[in-house]
Image (cartoon, grey):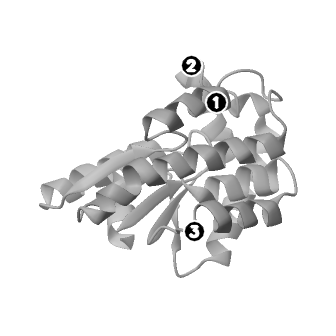
Amino acid sequence: MLISFEGIDGCGKSTQARLLTETLQAEGRDVLLTREPGGSPGAEEIRSLLVQGAGERWSPETECLLFTAARRDHLERTIRPALAAGRSVLTDRFADSTRVYQGTARADLRAMVDRLHALMIGVEPDRTFVIDIDPVIGLERGMARGGAEDRFESLGLEFQQRLAQGFRALAAEYPDRVRLIDGSGPPQEVAARVRSAL
């Protein structure tokens, strides 16, 4: 399976991706944990361009092209080989992030995002978990992390609120694939909700 974790900045999706990976490995499954942007050497180079610097460093259109380029490299060099070898792949973000961030929250580019995805990626996860939390909490967590990878957090609370709305709408749009997970409470409680939904 290809399983993706999505949500606003600071929602806990990276923690949940790691916890589900550990749970599935303990159950004897062969699992690869990866991330976007990144997950392959070329995509990791593109990552630094996307997550560092000023919030308005790139236009939404340029962001979309950069994310798609990184995703294509990730798909070719990491995801497809792992799936072909019989492994399950858990990814911290995938195409739904581009649909929400660049497609709706940054600009009205959803049609372009979907066309690029169909042309260059053509793969959807078997299951997507959207970790849903209050944008105020997510932004506080994201800013508290520190470090250089805070470009999207720097766009502020209103942007995080638009993201949250976008991810909730995505869950309604793809009910067979996307599961909205209550992200409140301790990580292990959220992890139990994820495992039950899987």
Q: Is residue 144 visible?
A: yes
Helix, strand or loop under label 3: loop
| Mark nearer the N terminus (1 vs 3) | 1
The one of 184 and 198 positioned closer to us in this rendering: 198
Q: Quadrant of the N terminus?
A: bottom left
Residue at the far bottom in the pictured view: 176
Q: What type is the residue that disc 1 sits on?
A: Val
Q: Which mark is residue 146?
A: 2
Query: Which numbered disc, 1 or 3, marks the residue closer to the eye?
Result: 3
Q: What type is the residue that disc 3 sits on?
A: Gly
Query: Separation of disc 2 and disc 3 at Cα?
Result: 35 Å
Q: Which residue is mark 1?
A: 51
Query: Separation of disc 1 and disc 2 at Cα?
Result: 13 Å
| Mark nearer the N terminus (2 vs 3) | 3
Q: Is residue 180 left or right of residue 23?
A: right
Helix, strand or loop under label 1: helix
Whole-percent x, y for residue 144 in the image: 57, 23
The one of 89 and 70 positioned closer to us in this rendering: 70
| Mark nearer the N terminus (1 vs 2) | 1
Please name the residue shown 80% across and 61% down the image.
Answer: 112
